[in-house]
Image (cartoon, helix red, strand yellow):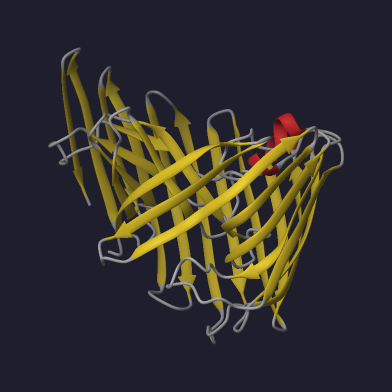
Amino acid sequence: RDTRENGFTELFGRAGPGTWQTRYSRDTGGANRVTDYHWQTRRDGFAALIGHQLISGQALLSSFDLTGAQLAWSNQPERLLTPLGDRRLVEDSVSPIRNFRGQGPPGGIAELRINGRVLERQRIRLDGEFEFLDVEIPAGFVDIRVDLFKPFALSAPVNSLDFSTRASQRLLPAGATRLFAAVGLEGNPLDDRVEDRDAAGLVNLRQAVGENLTLEAAAQSSEDGDQTALGLVMGLSHLGVASLSAAHNNGATATLATLDGDWRHAFWRVSLRDRDAGFRPNIDKDERDYFTEVGLRNWPLWEVSLIARERFGPGTDVNFIKPAARLRPFQGLTLQSRPDSQGDYVHDLNWRINRDNQLRARQD
């Protein structure tokens, strides 16, 4: 497993009409990095940032380090722009770059799992806060969870927080418009691990047409090429919410179609992603990642589903159809068994014996 365990120090404060921050980190390999340093401000429907960040124009497009200026505007800023002092001007739940924050046992461990696989661990601060920053998430449906462990009790988590993506999270409020743009130099002059390159930039426009249709257009230019993307998100009543996106780069195309919904006791999630060879630099193979889950639930008593996944391209090919289940046979006892992105099962048992005693076990 490729698991990141990092230590970091952050500084932040106010400066004039805005706020500033910087982040110093040191990973297990001994590398020192200065990243995410910037000054930002807000005024009416505008937000601006000057400095360094890892950014991307759309879920199908590549991410890159940019040192320069960012600008965001919305006619509904209280809902579509972040407040002053946040790390980003806009925070999309389905962005390819995500931050995950929450509360856990002080001094314990927060473990980030993507599609059942551990990506990163960190020590929870003494005030109970944890935060995973600049996590790159693949396009489509992704099962994202943060497991929380008490100090010196790493055999089983005491809680699990769900940050999974949903197509419904991309629907804007009726009549809403949001524009996000950035320009500067690709790279980070304060980080030797990131090569400085030429000018780069991006623009992303999202427009709601009524309550059940949101349109999106994006373009960006970086070392990976001149990329464009178009997309839409549609509310389909009882069928759920569907999204369609297509992107173009280096003469190749990437597409993504998703659908998620529920009706009465039934639920379904579908994510179909394809990339032509050459869409991503140095990848000369076609890529596919298809995921489908259909099931029935009567929670908090039971939930059963069937999960199918087909993936090929760089790395390990996967093709499986397997059942998953979550049961609560009586108050306080929860059993769960679910395949991860490789098709390997993860089994969980959580038994709250009484108010002061709890038993948790996991096998993966």
Q: Can residue 258 be seen in the rendering of this structure? A: yes
The mark tally for this picture is: 0
Above/below status of 134 relative to 15: below
Instruction: Judge left or right: residue 182 versus residue 350.
Output: right
Q: Which residue is located at x 48 percent, y 36 percent?
A: 296
> For residue 111, what is the image quadrant?
top left
Q: Quadrant of the N terminus?
A: bottom left
Instruction: Judge left or right: residue 241 versus residue 165.
Output: right
Q: Position of residue 3 (x, y in %)?
A: 30, 59
Above/below status of 117 relative to 17: below
Q: Which residue is located at x 55 percent, y 54 percent?
A: 97
Q: Can residue 90 be seen in the rendering of this structure? A: no
> For residue 318, what is the image quadrant?
bottom left
* Nearer to me, 314 or 319: 314
Residue lying farthest front? Answer: 16
Q: Which residue is located at x 27 percent, y 17 percent?
A: 331
Q: Position of residue 208 (x, y in %)?
A: 83, 41
Q: Position of residue 31 (x, y in %)?
A: 32, 66
* Nearer to me, 313 or 6: 6
Q: Position of residue 134 (x, y in %)?
A: 49, 53
Above/below status of 299 relative to 276: above
Q: Which residue is located at x 61 percent, y 46 percent?
A: 39
* Nearer to me, 103 or 290: 103
Above/below status of 277 relative to 325: below
* Nearer to me, 317 or 45: 45
